[in-house]
Amino acid sequence: MRTAMLALLLGAALPALADEGMWTFDNFPAAAVKAKYGATLDSAWLDRVRRSTIRLSNCTASFVSPEGLILTNHHCVEACLANLSSRDQSLVQTGFVSRSRNDEPRCATQVADVLQAMENVTDKVMQAISGLDQTAANEARKKVLTQLEQACEKGTRLKCESVTLYQGGQYFLYKYKRYDDVRLVLAPEADIAAFGGDPDNFQFPRWSLDFSMLRAYENGKPAKTPDHLPIRFAGPEAGEFVLVSGHPGSTERLDTRAELAFQRDLVLPNWLLRYSELRGRYIQYGKGSEAAARIVEEPLNSLENGIKVRRKLLDALHEDSLLEAKSEAEQALRVKMAGDASFGDPWADIARATTIERGLYLPYLFLEGAGGFNSATFRYARTLVRAAAERGKPNTERLREYADTALPRLAQQTLAAIPVYPELENLTLSFSLERMREWLGPDHPVVRQLLAKDSPDSLAAKLIAGTKLADPAIRKQLWDGGEAAIAASNDPMIRLALAIDERSRAVRKRYEDEVEAPITAASEKIAAARFKVYGTNVYPDATFTLRLNYGTVAGWNEDGRDIPPFTYLGKAFERATGSAPFRIPDSWLKVRDSLDMQTPFCISTTNDIVGGNSGSPLIDAQGRIVGLMFDGNIHSISGRYWFDAAKNRAIAVHPAILREALQKVYHADTVLRELGVR
Amino acid sequence: MRTAMLALLLGAALPALADEGMWTFDNFPAAAVKAKYGATLDSAWLDRVRRSTIRLSNCTASFVSPEGLILTNHHCVEACLANLSSRDQSLVQTGFVSRSRNDEPRCATQVADVLQAMENVTDKVMQAISGLDQTAANEARKKVLTQLEQACEKGTRLKCESVTLYQGGQYFLYKYKRYDDVRLVLAPEADIAAFGGDPDNFQFPRWSLDFSMLRAYENGKPAKTPDHLPIRFAGPEAGEFVLVSGHPGSTERLDTRAELAFQRDLVLPNWLLRYSELRGRYIQYGKGSEAAARIVEEPLNSLENGIKVRRKLLDALHEDSLLEAKSEAEQALRVKMAGDASFGDPWADIARATTIERGLYLPYLFLEGAGGFNSATFRYARTLVRAAAERGKPNTERLREYADTALPRLAQQTLAAIPVYPELENLTLSFSLERMREWLGPDHPVVRQLLAKDSPDSLAAKLIAGTKLADPAIRKQLWDGGEAAIAASNDPMIRLALAIDERSRAVRKRYEDEVEAPITAASEKIAAARFKVYGTNVYPDATFTLRLNYGTVAGWNEDGRDIPPFTYLGKAFERATGSAPFRIPDSWLKVRDSLDMQTPFCISTTNDIVGGNSGSPLIDAQGRIVGLMFDGNIHSISGRYWFDAAKNRAIAVHPAILREALQKVYHADTVLRELGVR
């Protein structure tokens, strides 16, 4: 393992080993693929796949019909399902099947972005920061990116976002067509979509029907989407060459040892401790009544996924050889750069910055990160307070998330009518206030300010009972009313957001100047050195931007045992216990006798994917969908830090089970016709 | 820090630096103390202090009157207070003041042990294992210890326990006088005893009146205790030489790097994740009603203490320099032993064993460790099932915890009438079943055996509703009835304990043969090498046996800020919020005007203590009590692995606040008279 990891860590800047790599579409190693697999992926192929691939707010998806029909995972639309639910009825539990176009409800905060163009703006950024010290450069870098985004959007109808690749080695503008009207077409019941629940999450063999369908609308009508991917319902062969197009969220394969140690020592343990406790509060709360169980289901599922991921990330960072290999890779590059006196020691610069970060982390997390104020209404209050203040400033002087190009999306998220449950608000806010007091200490100024004569419970109760921000009409008034409306508001959550704003901004400023500025400057240096020494035939860390990777349909060997790459429907019925999360829904039990128990269910492949790739199409060499990515195996989690070619596997829903479900269980005839079945 | 730690790690086998060290009474460095502090601690002094110091089942305590009166911490009697409580009334919340001897209720499972003699039996153990392979030696070692204990108890009325010191460098028999009738005399309300609660736990400055009083009884009458310690109510001076006599629970300062890495990678993260979640479940459950809050209070407090400790232990092990220093110290000793061909590489042996341990840890934890069956009635069932089976075997063939010398205590614990709350049993059992399924996986044989057609909730509900083991009379029948009664029982918890017993014993056997045996053998070798190279003027790791350590009354410097060693009553009133855990009880508010706000409250000292020392007397050179140890500062937690002389501080309740409370708040006149006040 040691050798493999060192090779990888150097290899992050060498032609990738095995089938590792999350390649940008402008730098895909088509020649290497041709040589190894004989597949010809020309620019027409790449363009069509790119224009058929969708970035949702939290996932990937793809167009599967010319009329805007979208295929993605169930867990990618779980928040939408929860938003369309109430105390009395949960679409997460019941599922949803649209019977006609008029019947497709809108996912209030969802968008679908399709990448149209990529522009390299590295030179413009470098020019803007040239000659500046680290702190000034950090501010100038943000300003120029804001300017470039703004200029890009002017005169086009595209959504322009800057992207930092290779830890600052390249800066790009990515230009998207955005659909901001996305509606729900079909979702199975959570019991089958997430069959196996948290225990089976990141496991394989697996039997989760983790799919759903959305539709993009334009001007109130289904969008025209000539670029879309056909589905090959028979699915792929074992060993077949396959690709995944999608938006891997975030990896840290190029991060330094000091940055990884910071994750290991502070970020991961702190998160895991706090959110394991919240998990316990959610579970216990959900036992109170069926309504309680319904409203807690979606946040609990999301939390449990986060816990499992971070638990395995911490395991990965406890592999001392990984950190040692990092040190060796850093030393190797340091030696190669020894002749360049101006190079200095950027790794030491980063280590120094992370030492400062250790001192700033908790106040940043609880105040600026709002970790002490875990409540939907507080998040609304924070956004309304800051949007009002920031919109009064010139565009480039604002906090980046309030720049003009960001405001339409922010308004959509802030003003959407989605349910807010006061009982859940009380739970999460009281919890987070109590943990803020624990981690910052009862004598921290903000803790004294808020809790000198209140308990976390009593303060949360007052705030939640008093705030009106659960009402979207009130939020609209405050959004439209701007600074004057905020100043005049006596909403207690608005007053709270105002009361802690100065201290929150102060810790953010310190973080930006003392941590972000030196780390960004040093990372740019390291990135430039890597390009110089190892060349440019490399892939950047994941940044929730479009990537393409390739691999094969294959299982792996676990402790001497071969895991085959396919599972079949029959086994799901064998494993069912009758109780969640191993309960097969009635809709399936009713038609059990008509189902083909030999239908393939899930697929294991060697593709290099991470969170964010959920919902990605698994594609054959002809550009047809042969699977729907929804997870990785347990070894895939360490893919955040390095790619283990022997054991890291991606998991997809097999298209045959999609057809079986649509035909025999959900009777979704119109959808099937739209997919070209029969 | 690095240098200091390396010095320490070597220094664990060198005359201790600073005032570090948990010395056994037979090897106390009286000469060094005389030279440094001018104090003469002769054998009469040591004998008197030893015979005045008490080991409770979970803490330390001391005799403070000739009539068996015992001083210890509130948190040491919290379980007793909870056992004497009900859904309707909590002595944890209300406190308790006995008004006469007839009024002192018994703590049903508490004992008070006083060390009478120590016998070195190392040669006998070495003789018993001579020439055996590791596995056989491991069994023979246990057998001879059982035999030695049994022989020791025959013909005396003493309780004999074997003790392993220096990781196997020495074996002792410790001989105790045991009082198994221990009664409650006085406890303040938790609000003042644990003022500051979990947020202030392991913090200083501090204002917790963490004291209580018990009394040892013999033959139904207060015990005669001519050896006891007078209290010097004025308390110590800043800088004064002070000692702590007590029973530090467990340290791992002599453990190897591989053993510490195992703690860091598996034991601590797993525990923290699971119990943080249980914390959340407890807290949420306690919000349901006042009765719920009452019955959850004691287990929650205990859990939160455990979480804080382990959180900081994990922090300590993330200090890479600690592990590097371990490696260097190991290498230094390896080099010194290079001439001895028979020495081999015991560190490598231990590392190999911990690799096996990584594979066995989870099944051991959930099955043999009963981590999957967190329920008082399951623990009763396990004990009853195993006691019945083991008592049928010859004494030396039994699992050690069922040897003849252990049975009286086991019976006391198993048969005591203490409350069992089904609602809490459901909570903890369902939780632990769910986590067993998570960590072992839904396809583990025991998980399939139990949960193939049940959810954790439904199985827990059936077991708790069906078991009668909450009734002590039923437990008595099964204890007395032995194997036949167990075989005939249809109690579902007994059936469960039987159903998993074979698999549990199997994983224990593998653990003993493949992990414990090689680690014990290698540890004995390392211990012998340490004695050979560094001599015997050293202290062993803590083992919850009697130790004496010395230091001074002193604060420390925290990030450039001097923390003074005393706190005063007035500040507690300033910090009070009116809500738990910062609520001052009514009994204090009523007499507020009569209190001297300048009364010293808590004391910081440099003594080297850990958990288990709670309740220890802080003693001056004349053998008078000048404080009651109850905690350490946040830096003391890493004392498990090394002693940080600059920052590790012990915390005591000041005797002046004890007198103030007894006189003005609790009007405990008879107790005061017994303590010789006025």
Image (tube, coloured by chain):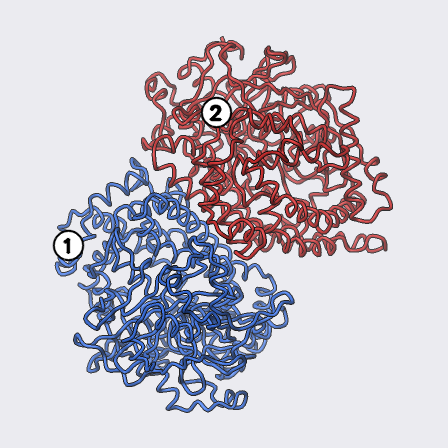
Chain colours: A blue, B red
Left or right of A299 in this view: A391: left
Q: Quadrant of the N terminus of chain A?
A: bottom right
Is any part of residue B496 visible from this angle?
A: yes
User: Is there one chain holding both mark 1 and mark 2?
Assistant: no
Measuring from the top left, give residue A517's x and y in whole percent. 39, 66
* Residue indicated by mark 1: A474
Indicate the amino acid at tag 2: Leu
Is any part of residue B60 visible from this angle?
A: no
Q: Check if mark 1's residue and mark 2's residue have beta carbons within 8 Å.
A: no
Query: What chain does mark 2 sit on?
Result: B
Measuring from the top left, give residue A259's x and y in whole percent. 49, 63
Look at the numbered disc 2 and give the secondary structure of its residue. helix
- On the image, which quarter does residue A177 sit in? bottom left
Residue nearest the viewer, comparing A494 with B27: A494
Indicate the amino acid at tag 1: Ile
- Could you say which disc has been placed on residue A26 in the image? none
- Could you say which disc has been placed on residue B81 in the image? 2
Residue nearest the viewer, comparing B605 with A448: A448
Q: CA distance from mark 1 to mark 2?
A: 51 Å
Residue nearest the viewer, comparing B533 with A538: A538
Other residues around mark 1 within 10 Å, as few (<14) / some (14–19) / many (≥20): few
Measuring from the top left, give residue A594's x and y in whole percent. 40, 69
Look at the numbered disc 1 and give the secondary structure of its residue. helix
Other residues around mark 2 within 10 Å, as few (<14) / some (14–19) / many (≥20): many
Residue nearest the viewer, comparing B76 with A58: A58
Q: Which residue is drawn at the image coordinates 47% and 47% (left, top)?
A: B456
- On the image, which quarter does residue A192 sit in? bottom left
Circle 1 or circle 2, nearest the eye? 2
Measuring from the top left, give residue B536's x and y in whole percent. 77, 38
Q: Quadrant of the C terminus of chain A?
A: bottom left
- On the image, which quarter does residue A137 sit in? bottom left
